[in-house]
Amino acid sequence: MELLASSKHSPLFSRYYSSPMYSASGTAFLLKPVFLRGVSGSLHLVLLFVLFLSWVYKKFKVGRGEAPKGRNGWSDEGLVTLLDLALRTLAWGALCVYFHLVLYRKHVNASVQNFVSDIVSVATGLFFCYLGYIGNNEGDDTLLEEPLLNGDILTFSGMGPLIAVGNKKTLDLEDVPQLDAGDSVVRSFPTFKNKLAVECGTFNRMTTLKLVKALISSIWKEILLTALLVVIYALASYVGPYLIDTFVQYLNGQQEFKNEGYILVSVFFAAKLVECFSQRHLFFRVQQAGIKVRSVLIAMIYNKGLTLSCQSKQGHSIGEIINFMSVDAERIGEFGWYMHEPWMVLVQVVIALLILYKNLGLASIATLIATIIVMLANVPLGKLQERFQDKIMESKDRRMKATSEILGNMRILKLQGWEIKFLSKINELRKTKEGWLKKFVYTFAMSSFVFWGAPTFVSVVTFGACILLGIPLESGKILSALATFRILQEPIYNLPDTISMIAQTRVSLDRIASFLRLDDLQSDVIEKLPRDESILEACSLKKDLEILSFGDQTVIGERGINLSGGQKQRIQIARALYQDADIYLFDDPFSAVDAHTGSHLFKECLLGLLSSKTVVYVTHQVEFLPAADLILVMKDGRITQAGKYRDILNSGTDFVELVGAHKKALSALDSAEAGSASESTSMSMEDGSMASANEVVQKQENKDVQDGKADDIVGSKGQIIQEEEREKGKVGFSVYWKYITMAYGGVLVPFILLAQVLFQLLQIGSNYWMAWGSPVSQDMKPAVGSSMLIIVYVALAIGSSFCILVRSTLLGTAGYKTATLLFNKMYFCIFRAPMSFFDSTPTGRLLNRASTDQTAVDLNIPNRVGAVASSMIQLLGIIAVMSQVAWQVFIIFIPVIGTCIWYQQYYIPSARELARLVGVCKAPVIQHFAETISGATTIRSFDEGSRFSGTNMKLTDAYCRPMFHIAGAMEWLCFRLDMLSLITFAISLLFVISLPVGVMVPGIAGLAVTYGLNLNMIQMHVIWNICDMENKIISVERIFQYTCIPSEPPLMIEENQPDYSWPSHGEVDIRDLQVRYAPHMPLVLRGLTCTFPGGMKTGIVGRTGNGKSTLIQALFRIVEPAAGQIMIDGINISLIGLHDLRSRPSIIPQDPTMFEGTVRSNLDPLEEYTDEQIWEALDKCQLGDEVRKKEGKLDSTVSENGENWSVGQRQLVCLGRVLLKKSKVLVLDEATASVDTATDNLIQQTLRKHFSNCTVITIAHRITSVLDSDMVLLLNNGLIKEFDSPTRLLENKSSSFAQLVAEYTVRSNSSVEK
């Protein structure tokens, strides 16, 4: 670095000393060139010698220990050397100034170009000193400890280490440096929250204005800095257009002062340098501010979601709340790009008009009028775009809401055979969006037409006004005007977009403010104590943890998908016990566990560990009530009875009804079994405990085996939830090829390219025509008349505008069609995926692709692909124009373009992986958010809000880290590309001014300079667009991932379609059935062989975790058999289509599920039945009167997940579905676990009445639900242990079934006899 800095001076400084000197007495010898060159050379030799000694010393000290490190990793010696180099550079600068100023006063003929060269040399030397000081990094492991802002923020060299790492290996999140403390949400959120509290007092008084004030106060420094950068950038960008006329006149020989050409080149260069620095830092800072705003809003929305009252939550679905975070907060964060546009467009228009007035006089008024017309033309287009954008967002909200609900209940859809119907519902919602998307795309095409046509229209009006007013059109003034129009093009075009963005941002701010002022609930503070092993014993969890592959570190899938219902309930009880609270609230805690486990939990937890605590427990199981000190009987939302068990049993009717229902359930036991149970009860009561029942528990605990739903999905090789899959390395050419050829086989692509090429040729042609056809000065004769000049220009302008309209329309059509095809394919593949895919894939990952990635495909990627093509064609056009002036510029272009390509290749691996990390890191934020909102009540109950909020902030920072460094990496690249372009531009200008007057046409040379002013921007745009396209195309790559998901077997197999009446008898024959959840996992069902007789009722029982639910999943082919087969009425179910199988049997699942919609759509989603049939089913399931009370009757609203219906009512709706379907085979999967005994009896009576001739297969924890079955199947460790009629099994007192009944009877009769 030192050698590099020093070498910048000698050749440049020595140029000056070759100039003729003024000889004065006494100093003549000192001023002779030979002496000055000798001094210069000697000093450089001394400097090089010192640097050589420094290098030798550094080499010598290696191995003897490092010197103490100072700032930025520099040793003390290194700092001294660097300081010495900087001082020497300043000394050279002072000497230069002395020679040029002092000797100039003595009439020495010092050339200005040498003075400029020396100044540039000094500045360059100091610049490299600065780079050396800031950029040096002698540490090896400082990547994660040195955020970007701690490096050289001037040139973004702090990104260098990260990009270097990414060029050597695939970047992972661990490689990405942490955010600076000021950018981390962990630090910025408390500050923002305090400022918001100061503004609002309480959040209930939140308004949009107060929210905006708090946001502004949290980033006011960034706002002021970016405002300053915007002004600097605007002023610097207009220097070129201002000086072009002067430059053309200079080329024509009209030199106003000596060395004017070099001064002009220096000013051009300095202005472009300032423009580059200000633009790069402006873009980076607005992104930095946007990331900070987005982070604090996400944290604010998350915390609000944690504290929402139940009433407030009912007004907002989970999908809507997620949209506040994923859409509204994102949009507000992106507003940083637009926040200065409203006032800056006025400044730019004023500057442009001043330049035009200087060159064209009163014709600038015509320019102003034309500019206003263009702005007004943009207004309706902007309003249309805003309207269409709003409609797109509304339809997206509805689609994402439905998608979220469907993905969360996919198991139910597959069991019922409804997934294709619900897919069609999603497609209908998508078609609504597609209608608005198509309108938006074509409106955007019109906006592009206005954008590219605006400079042409304004220039035509301006030049026409010049002709009418008699203002002479000179080539220099024309080129200055054209350059001004091109700069003015962007703010004019962006104004409607800015207005639209302001409106959208205001809508998002209103939505967030209204959400933040909703009512809250307050959390209770609970003291936490360390884990106690006795709690695991009391909750029967030790065996589960021993069997799980990762013990208590096993990752739990979304909604506890890899746990059985009993395991989830026992974990919840254990979680409550760990809090060691004074008061415990239990809401039916034993509903999902079998009899022996329920007895154990009640005895060990409620009567044991919590014996000295206040426990309030809600239960549907009457058998647990006698142990209560106080019983409250509820009816219609009121307490009707209160007291001890025996007291209220004799004092009213409501409690008697509940106990009566319980007794009725027990009446199925005959006198022999009852006697046996009574005997057991007596023994247990005499011991003062439930001893005999507990003995059975202890005996069976040794046989308890992990449920297939848990261990078999998790497996021995890994957790159920794996890190999200992401491609690594370069995005394959196949991704691009499939994308561009997906719409109409790619036939539109050649026409899009042709239209862009013609546009560029006509644009260059029109400008070339004006530069060639107009005179350089008033005293020269024009090549063509003014009328011909303007007519040809208008014709070429109209042609170019038409080409861009065709290009924009075709590009929009291709992009729209491609987005639609990708959407349909992705959703179809997701809906046809096997259930194992949904078990192991969090919903957040799916929603991220359906939301963020699909939006990118809909709105962004077509424009990015088009921008790559257009910018490359523009660059070729600029090179062609500049080469017309001097082909020698290719000598510069070739190495510069080669260097640019090298930089792009060096940068893109890091940028690509950072973009992938953004996609991967966003899904956990959404997933955590969705699960938090769903479980907010539980989180508040345990006062874990702060922990969850902390997790959210960590996930948000992890999401923002790659986003932040993407911005930094992009500016790192763009800065270097800008510098290379500036070098090319400056050398080209130097070459132009070095040619003698008359060698080239000044107008054409000026045209080359006009295009050259855009060289750095276009050259940067080419590389930027290529990189950005590769970053954005990752969304296509991620969607392609989900179009290749392994599918379930076919829905229908025509050659094996069963008859319409199948199954007519309902016999289920199971032959050597073996089931595992994955090839590498152990068998869950290990060879079952049995027959469920047609028209008879079969109960399936067994301890928790012995394969009961797995058998049902195999019956519906949710999981395919590893061996063996299941025959229904003689047909092998593995040989028929899945829809034919799943649509024929009926199932009432354990978790009663309803979908957002109406009562009708929930009972009859396939729209197969008449209203009369639906009312009949409602009456049969005792819901008819309830629905008739509702205003909408069958069209009454059902909220998301049926939350406006009770659990019991939802279960009765599930019963209504099967009553409508009237299947010959009915499966009840613990269907009454969550309802009270009376509702259970009602369901059982209805089933007995209306399914008396059907095959009914029942899995139940309540023994009474299977006592009236014709056959009972008892599973143990995936094998059939017992299969016989209940009567025969009960006669054998040693049978496992008899022991289960004994346990249940012990527990139940204890309450009845009391």
Image (cartoon, grey):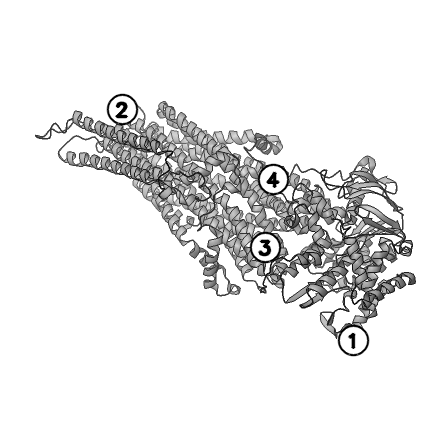
Q: Provide the residue designation for mark 1.
A: 647
Please identify the quadrant where the C terminus is shown. Answer: bottom right
Find the distance from the CA under tag 4 to the CA under tag 3: 26 Å
394 sits to left or right of 113: right
Instruction: Identify the mark nearer the N-term, 2 or 4.
Output: 4
Find the distance from the CA under tag 4 to the CA under tag 1: 62 Å
Q: Residue at x 56, y 62 (%)?
A: 518
Q: Nearer the viewer, residue 1209 or 358?
A: 1209
923 sits to left or right of 792: right
Find the distance from the CA under tag 2 to the CA under tag 4: 64 Å
Q: Provide the residue designation for mark 2.
A: 996
Question: Mark 3 touching mark 2, by CB under 8 A?
Answer: no
Please identify the quadrant where the N terminus is shown. Answer: top left
Find the distance from the CA under tag 1 to the CA under tag 2: 118 Å
Extreme residue in the left direction? 25
Question: Mark 2 touching mark 4, by CB under 8 A?
Answer: no
Q: Residue at x 48, y 29 (%)?
A: 758
- Compared to residue 585, the image places residue 797 above or below, namely above
Q: Quadrant of residue 480?
A: top left
Label 1 sits on what residue type? Asp
Q: Where is residue 1282 shown, x and y percent of the image?
A: 86, 49
Which label sits on residue 321? 3
Find the distance from the CA under tag 1 to the CA under tag 3: 48 Å
Q: Nearer the viewer, mark 4 or mark 3?
A: 4
Q: Provide the residue designation for mark 4.
A: 725
Label 2 sits on what residue type? Pro
Tag 4 secondary structure: loop
Q: Where is residue 695 shown, x and y percent of the image?
A: 80, 58
Other residues around mark 2 within 10 Å, as few (<14) / some (14–19) / many (≥20):
few
Other residues around mark 1 within 10 Å, as few (<14) / some (14–19) / many (≥20):
few
Q: Where is residue 800 shown, x and y percent of the image?
A: 46, 33
Label 4 sits on what residue type? Glu
